[in-house]
Image: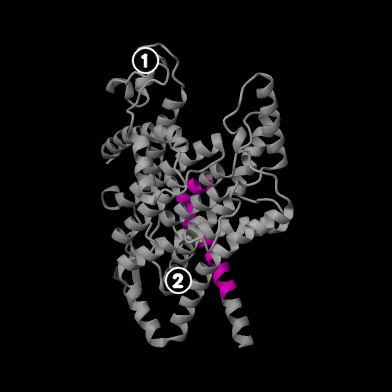
């Protein structure tokens, strides 16, 4: 058995390092792809794909195409001594570091899932048999790579997306929308294909969750149609306002560049200053965008509660694994994005300054589609503790610089991917009691 694990570990490290090599390309090229605002989605996708695949890997100094042996993850950089074979220019050690991190992450999660048995759990464990008293004996909680590799592959796809998004966000304070939406699309498709309630990591939705996902999803489509027709306008069309400290730092950097006779790339793109009133007005446009999904979700829930025949048919529909998995992933995406977005809106209205970036909304949209509504919500509330840990590190060692919130969301998601099941088991009784109390209050009022 250990020999079999060793074979998988070696293969997964090599495969993860290859993924890390591609992530280096994504981190460098994706934020620099310029897509016109009026370009269609398909053309934008083709433009982005072309930028990531062409030209082939080459030395940025002498522009020479690299040989295959120079592109071997981790070891290629070591064999070259950190310098280009042709012009002897230095190659950043960031490339092999990212490749090694990706490979080690693939190995770490394999060990956690399949050796330590820490990670995804089944929504409803399979019933193996009945005991002498007629009570069910549950099983199927042991994760086996040969049986459960699709969930592992899906989770590693998310880890790769989070790593790329974090590196870009840490450097440029942006999260390209293509990364979380790729995770969301893949997550929704995979869960629709493989999910069943006894599968660890499955997201099969029940009647209530499926109704919220259906109504919210239809409402989201309505919002997107209204946005593309100009009936809902974009907030902060000239760019979101910078914090005072960030604007002061940017202006000081621009002044230094002027004295040296240089011009910074972002000088003409510096967003305008907004008053608190203007910021609150702009964030109102985002509230309008969220209104159709919220209304759609409420109407769908009311429909399955008020219409008995429809409610019964809906419950039978949710028993279909493909439908339950599909709507479970959609529910996770909607809840993951909504939790961050409503925090952004309420925080902005309360303080008159932008609370969080929209990139974080998209990031948790993708996380929710892969890991589910509960995991995305727990990750969002765990992320501040990751930020506190980083702040303490800076305070004690005086190292590092300020980071955007995206990397902390990614760190929290990486932790929740392992420990969501015990966290959920601990929180479930309290949440059930709260829901029961709310139900009784509304019942008393009725």
Residue segment shown in magenta? 412-435
The answer to whether residue 422 shows anywhere in this view is: no
**Which quarter shows the N terminus?**
top left
Q: Looking at the rendering, in which quadrant would you find the C terminus?
A: bottom right
Task: Tell me if residue 424 is in the magenta stretch.
Answer: yes
Q: How far across and how far down the image is residue 223, in percent?
A: 49, 64
Residue at 40% over, 32% down = 25
Q: Nearer the viewer, residue 99 or 36?
A: 36
Count neighbours of disc 1 (C-alpha within 10 A) and say few if under 14, some if 14 to 19, many if 20 or more. Answer: some
Q: Is residue 426 visible?
A: yes
Measured in 3D between alpha carbons, the distance from the residue under mark 1 to the one under mark 2, in whole angstroms, is 56 Å
Q: Earlier in the sequence, mark 1 or mark 2?
A: 1
Q: Describe residue 224's horizontal placement relative to residue 346 as left or right.
A: left
- Element type at mark 2: helix
Mark 2 closeness class: few <14, some 14–19, many ≥20 residues within 10 Å: many
Badge nearest the viewer, 1 or 2: 2
| Main SS class of the magenta portion in the image | helix
Is 443 inside the magenta-drawn segment? Answer: no
Label 1: element kind = loop
Colour scheme in the image?
one colour
The residue at which mark 2 appears reads as 215
Horizontal side of residue 403 vs 144, given as left or right: right
> Which residue corresponds to the image point at 46% horizontal and 52% vertical from the top-left?
367
Residue 426 at x, y percent in the picture: 54, 61
Residue 80: which numbered mark, if any? 1
Of the pair 279 and 355, the residue shown nearer to us: 279
Picture coordinates of residue 395 (x, y %)?
69, 33
Q: Residue 36: x, y in percent?
A: 45, 44
Total numbered badges shown on the rendered structure: 2
């Amino acid at each position: 058995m250990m020999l079999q694990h060793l074979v998988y570990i070696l293969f997964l490290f090599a495969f993860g390092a290859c993924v890390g090599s591609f992530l280096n390309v994504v981190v460098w090229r994706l934020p620099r792809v310029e897509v016109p605002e009026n370009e269609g989605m398909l053309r934008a996708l083709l433009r982005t794909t072309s930028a990531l695949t062409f030209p082939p890997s080459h030395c940025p100094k002498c522009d020479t195409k690299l040989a295959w042996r120079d592109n071997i993850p981790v070891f290629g950089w070591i064999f070259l001594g950190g310098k280009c074979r042709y012009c002897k220019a230095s190659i950043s050690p960031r490339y092999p570091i990212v490749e090694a991190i990706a490979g080690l992450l693939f190995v770490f999660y394999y060990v956690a899932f399949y050796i330590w048995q820490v990670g995804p759990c089944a929504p409803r464990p399979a019933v193996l048999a009945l005991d002498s008293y007629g009570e069910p004996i549950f099983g199927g909680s042991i994760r086996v790579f040969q049986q459960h590799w699709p969930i592992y592959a899906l989770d590693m796809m998310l880890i790769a997306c989070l790593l790329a998004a974090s590196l870009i966000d840490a450097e440029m304070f942006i999260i390209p929308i293509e990364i979380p939406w790729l995770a969301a699309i893949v997550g929704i498709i995979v869960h629709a294909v493989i999910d069943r309630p006894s599968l660890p990591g499955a997201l099969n939705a029940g009647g209530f969750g499926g109704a919220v996902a259906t109504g919210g999803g239809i409402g989201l489509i309505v919002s997107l149609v209204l946005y593309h027709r100009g009936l809902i306008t974009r907030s902060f069309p000239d760019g979101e306002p910078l914090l005072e400290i960030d604007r002061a730092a940017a202006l000081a950097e621009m002044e230094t560049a002027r004295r040296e006779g240089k011009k910074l790339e972002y000088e003409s793109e510096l967003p305008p200053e907004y008053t608190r009133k203007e910021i609150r007005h702009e964030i109102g446009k985002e509230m309008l965008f969220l209104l159709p999904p919220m209304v759609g979700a409420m109407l769908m829930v009311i429909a399955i509660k008020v219409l008995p025949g429809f409610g019964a048919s809906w419950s039978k529909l949710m028993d279909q694994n493909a439908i339950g998995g599909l709507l479970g992933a959609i529910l996770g995406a909607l809840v993951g994005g909504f939790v961050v977005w409503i925090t952004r809106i309420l925080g902005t209205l309360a303080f008159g300054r932008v609370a969080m970036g929209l990139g974080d909304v998209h990031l948790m949209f993708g996380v929710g589609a892969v890991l589910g509504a509960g995991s995305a919500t727990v990750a969002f509330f765990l992320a501040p503790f990751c930020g506190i840990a980083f702040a303490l590190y800076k305070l004690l060692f005086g190292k590092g610089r300020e980071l955007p919130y995206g990397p902390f969301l990614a760190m929290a998601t990486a932790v929740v991917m392992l420990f969501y099941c015990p966290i959920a088991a601990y929180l479930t009784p309290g949440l059930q009691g709260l829901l029961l109390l709310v139900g009784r209050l509304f019942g008393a009022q009725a």
